[in-house]
């Protein structure tokens, strides 16, 4: 259980994130945590709640709000992913998502830079006013320099024993990413790893000049993956065919019930250019507080019950 | 059957007919990627380490290990004889199998034996044992050499360093995890 100082820090952190988005002209929204459909993604398993599901991300609802004409929206909400438990994982965690119409993934990278600089500035200010300035925020990380942008293909040639195509063909992409690449990312200042293979971004838009790559990125600080953003795939037919593929994979590997999110696909037809991102806030707070375990910064962790 | 999501420190699983204990474990999952269970295990018979990354769909057999309370009876040459305190069955382990544990075994001591496939593979001693000092140099009072320990031998033949006031015939407590002197025991 978090102590009083930790509770104050966590509250200030959430308050600052909200003020950042208010200042940038975003509308804060809330959507149902429990829904009858979930996003068909083969590597993410939802927790069932009666005959419905706890959201793995508010993504479908957020994009339906975008399609209805809301141009800049954000949300902070709990998300749930079954059997994800570890140093950086909790089955329930706080997610920040923001979406913009008329923007692409590069805009989101700028948003990330601005958000983290805003956070570190105000958290430090807060510590000075509370006379606890001896505890650094994001110790060892320089947020002022231009953040490195590294394509997935370049990261594989730089750090991996085999190249990207070999890794994909041998089914070793995730393993090499985790074991050989991630430990090098964002050690002195944050890094954006971008342009993922299309198969690894089922809701992301393909790059116009390279259809094997999706306009998707992940933000890394100290080897920890903090946010996943992309230019939204807004072609409803292509989205449907990617979901068909994901649903087939889910059915082949599990006995999970999974349905096509029809209302989402219908609304998607109204959506033009857009970009959206999901950031794990407990992990971000963990790094800001220089902690090693996600359980150090949540109000109650599973061990508290 | 166990699956990768059951993996945790201390879990005992069977791989290729050998029992392994999980000594280190980390869950990782890249965004939109597969869950990876990065695992370090020790072969409970050979002691060899195994480092392996498992996926969600990987399955394991649980290692069927049995723990039994047994009493140490006596040693004869290289053989150390134990008795099951429930059914009075006897068995022996060799000096080599027992390793350093022979330093602390005295007649009638109760220990835990771990069995795999009906073969004893490990023995767990009490953390603290009391043994009698059988050989010690007398403490020369006024010794100014500054030595604050001296070597003694206990009834099992084990030699260790103790404070200078310990004398022949004293009973001392030893920590079986470290092999070190803890205190002198007053009867």
Image (cartoon, coloured by chain):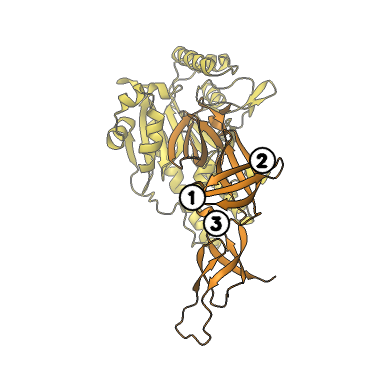
Chain colours: A yellow, B orange
Q: Which residue is mark 3?
A: B177
Q: Which residue is mark 2?
A: B89
Percent position of residue B147, x then y: 47, 78
- Image position of A11 with respect to A42: above or below: below
| Disc 1 from disc 2: Cα separation | 61 Å
> Which residue is the extreme one toward the right?
B86
Subunit that carries the residue with mark 3: B
Mark 2 or mark 3: name the one nearer the start of the chain.
Answer: 2
Nearest to viewer (mark 2 / mark 3): 2
Q: Which residue is mark 1?
A: A288
Disc 3 on helix, strand or loop? loop
**Whether labels 3 and 1 share one chain:** no
Subunit that carries the residue with mark 2: B
Q: Is residue B7 left or right of residue B52?
A: right
Question: Residue drawn at (29%, 29%), measured in percent from left and top?
Answer: A163
Percent position of residue A71, x then y: 50, 28
Q: Nearer the viewer, residue B68 or A142?
A: B68
- Image position of B69 with respect to A106: above or below: below
- Image position of A268 with respect to B174: above or below: above
Q: Crowdedness of circle 2 by 10 Å Cα count: few (<14), some, many (20+)?
A: few
Whether pointer 1 and pointer 2 mark residues with C-beta atoms closer than 8 Å, the reply is no
Percent position of residue A31, x then y: 62, 29
Q: Crowdedness of circle 1 by 10 Å Cα count: few (<14), some, many (20+)?
A: some
């Amino acid at each position: 259980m978090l102590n009083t100082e930790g509770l104050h820090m966590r509250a200030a952190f959430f308050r600052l994130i909200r003020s950042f988005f208010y200042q940038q002209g975003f509308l804060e929204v809330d959507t149902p945590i429990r829904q009858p459909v979930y996003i068909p993604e083969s590597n993410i398993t939802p927790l069932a709640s009666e005959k419905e599901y706890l959201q793995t991300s508010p993504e479908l609802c957020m994009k339906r709000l975008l399609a209805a004409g809301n141009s800049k929206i954000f949300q902070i909400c709990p998300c749930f992913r079954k059997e994800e438990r570890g140093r950086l994982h909790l089955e329930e965690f706080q997610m920040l998502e923001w979406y913009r119409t008329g923007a692409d993934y590069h805009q989101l990278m700028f948003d990330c830079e601005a958000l983290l600089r805003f956070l570190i500035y105000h958290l430090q200010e807060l510590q000075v006013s509370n006379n606890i300035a001896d505890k650094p925020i994001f110790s060892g990380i320089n947020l002022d320099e231009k953040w490195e942008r590294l394509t997935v293909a370049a990261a594989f040639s730089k750090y991996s024993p085999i190249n990207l195509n070999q890794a994909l063909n041998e089914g070793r992409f995730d393993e090499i990413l985790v074991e050989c690449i991630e430990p090098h990312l964002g050690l002195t200042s944050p890094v954006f790893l971008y342009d993922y293979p299309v198969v690894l971004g089922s809701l992301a838009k393909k790059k116009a000049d390279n259809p094997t790559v999706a306009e998707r990125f992940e933000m890394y600080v100290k080897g920890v993956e903090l946010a996943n953003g992309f230019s939204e795939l807004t072609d409803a037919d292509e989205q449907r065919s990617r979901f068909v593929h994901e649903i087939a994979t889910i059915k082949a590997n599990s006995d999970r019930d999974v349905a096509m999110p029809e209302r989402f696909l219908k609304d998607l037809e109204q959506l033009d250019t857009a970009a959206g991102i999901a950031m794990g806030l407990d992990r971000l707070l963990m790094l800001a507080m220089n902690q090693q375990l996600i359980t150090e910064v949540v109000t109650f962790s599973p061990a508290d019950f | 059957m166990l699956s990768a999501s059951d993996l945790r420190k201390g879990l005992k699983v069977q791989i290729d007919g050998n029992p392994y204990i999980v000594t280190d474990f980390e869950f990782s999952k890249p965004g939109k990627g597969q869950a990876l269970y990065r695992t370090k295990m020790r072969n409970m018979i050979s002691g060899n380490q195994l480092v392996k990354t498992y996926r969600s769909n990987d399955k394991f057999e649980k290692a069927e290990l049995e723990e039994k309370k047994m009493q140490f009876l006596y040693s004869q040459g290289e053989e150390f004889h134990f008795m099951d305190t429930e059914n009075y069955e006897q068995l022996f382990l060799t000096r080599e199998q027992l390793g350093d544990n022979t330093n602390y075994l005295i007649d009638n001591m109760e220990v835990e034996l771990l069995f795999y496939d009906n073969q004893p593979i490990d023995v767990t001693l009490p953390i603290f044992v009391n043994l009698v000092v059988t050989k010690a140099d007398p403490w020369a009072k006024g010794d100014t050499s500054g030595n604050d320990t001296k070597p003694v031998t206990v009834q099992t033949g084990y030699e260790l360093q103790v404070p200078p006031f310990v004398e022949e015939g004293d009973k001392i407590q030893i920590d079986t995890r470290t092999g070190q002197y803890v205190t002198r025991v007053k009867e």
